[in-house]
Amino acid sequence: MNEQKAVVNEQKAAVSGQKDAVNEPTMTVRGASSPAGSGEPRRVNILGAPVDSLTMEQAIASVEALLAAGGVHHVVTANPEILYGAQTDTELRQILHQASLVTADGIGVVWAASWLGQPVPARITGIDLMEALLVQAAHRAWPCFFLGGAPGVAETAAARMSERHRGLVIAGTQHGYFAPAEEPAVIKRICAAQPKLLFVGLGAPRQEKWIAAFARAQEQAQAQEQARQPQRPQLQQQQTQPRQRQQPQPQQQPQQQPQPQQAHPRSAMVAIGIGGSMDVLAGNVRRAPAWVQAAHIEWLYRLLSQPKRIGRQLKLPLFALAVMGQKNGQGGPKRQL
């Protein structure tokens, strides 16, 4: 009897465990699901666009994982202007969905997520993410490329960051005022420099579209190169084998056959849109004091110090209205993908 009771109890425990597993909440990341607590960030939906819910520490870890995976990856620091524009800009919306990481850039995005019942733990602005990554880059010897700003701005920003972070490797710099005809040469310089981190400050949404096109081109080039690589060792092996048969010499060491090149790890690069952060790091634009940032009114400080931003700031109330509409079931993209 005791043995039968023990078996019944074990069966009940197993069934209970299955129920708990079914009821366990999940977090969706880029179409995949993982159990809550697995360490993977979830994505929230704001106006039909994805935003990753994660802390700065998780963002840094995610970038590190992307570099380890190989390939070219796109990180979008999504502010209200980007999310609002993605409603009508199909290309921008697709870029957001295809990006490897989308952070909540600004208190407006944090508010929107909370209002929609999908709170994110922190805001992760472009400049904050860049500065945090520069610290890691100095420790891990990740070469960095600075692209953006007026002529001389990227160089100044790179020099100042090199002084601040001992050991930081600057792979190259390039201003953002290049003509379309100069773009192939710019891309060639970036590829030749082989940076791990590419910081792009061309303004939104130009920088997001530029990075997406750049990443697609690099992935295609890498795929073509990998397709050619396996054929080379075979051709060399066919050429060396007849020579070995014609001239056998026991005293000589056997000729080593070339090892096939592995398709992985692919050259890794993470490209991040940083907006006007290059001017801040170069010392041309002063960032809001810490207490202003803590009070979540950095947008007001920037408006008062840069009145020309009034046109962009006017989109903030439109963004708020759109988010309220989403909560009432009327938000999201104007056109479906």
Image (spheres, rainbow, N blue to C red):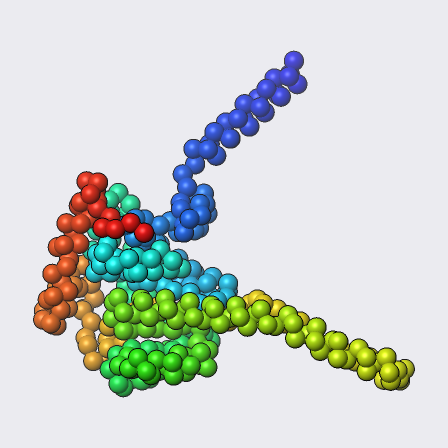
Please say whether residue 321 is visible from this viewpoint.
yes
- Name the foreground residue: 177 vs 247: 247
Left or right, residue 65 beside residue 119: right
Q: Is residue 271 above or below residue 51?
A: below
Left or right, residue 140 beside residue 96: right
Residue at 14% of width from left, 49% of height from top?
Answer: 321
Residue at 50% of width from left, 27% of height from top?
Answer: 16
Percent across and percent down for residue 145 are 38, 78
Quadrant into which the N terminus falls: top right
- Name the foreground residue: 257 vs 19: 257
Q: Is residue 155 above or below residue 61?
A: below
- Name the foreground residue: 178 vs 65: 178
Please say whether residue 128 is visible from this viewpoint.
no
Q: Is residue 334 above or below residue 329?
A: below
**Residue 277: which quarter of the image?**
bottom left
Residue at 65% of width from left, 75% of height from top?
Answer: 232
Q: Residue furthest right?
A: 250
**How many numbered marks have been drawn onto this rendered protein structure?**
0
Percent across and percent down for residue 176 are 28, 79
Q: Residue furthest top?
A: 1
Left or right, residue 218 beside residue 55: right
Percent across and percent down for residue 175 are 29, 82
